[in-house]
Amino acid sequence: MAIKNKMTMSFISCSENVGIARITAAAFAAQADFTLSEIEEIKVAVSEAISNAIIHGYGHQDGQIQFEMTLYEEKLECLIIDYGKGIADIALARQPAFSTDPERMGLGFVFMESFMDELDVKSGVGQGTTVKMGKMITKVH
């Protein structure tokens, strides 16, 4: 799979950076043949992954988040990495309405899964979390 374009950004885990990542994701995804609706879905999925890293990974404490996007001929791949608390039970965390924060609805992974074609989550307690998402590019002729 040949890479057409790639970008990497790193930022501290403050909520103001979610908006910056959303705008970056939209601008980067606009290079491909995505519809406006698909770009919106990518923005939401990226927002949810980065918000999870800030809220659950770091508990609102300062930490680093890596955000990468890679554009291939047939898909867009997003990678969000935090070095925070990690997830004890990924299968449980991916269940609708599950949240370690009682003030949250627990729909982050549900949105990521429904808006993206691929979702892979790797995590270890005390080792952070890596969320990898893919969105296929469907050519419209």
Image (spheres, rainbow, N blue to C red):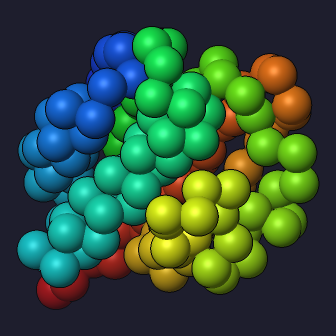
> Eyeballing the image, is 9 above or below 46?
above
Residue 53 appears at what percent x and percent y?
Answer: 52, 37
Which sits in the foreground, 127 or 85?
Answer: 85
> Which quadrant is the N terminus positioned in?
top right
Residue 136 appears at what percent x and percent y?
Answer: 44, 68
Which sits in the foreground, 20 or 59?
Answer: 59
> Which quadrant is the C terminus positioned in?
bottom left
> Eyeballing the image, is 7 above or below 78?
above
Rendered residue at 42%/56% (across/down): 48
Q: Quadrant of residue 128?
A: top right
Q: How many marks?
A: 0
Residue 122 appears at what percent x and percent y?
Answer: 78, 42
Rendered residue at 75%/62% (across/down): 93
Q: Quadrant of residue 40?
A: bottom left
Is residue 1 visible to us here?
no
Left or right: residue 140 compared with residue 90: left
Left or right: residue 25 compared with residue 9: left
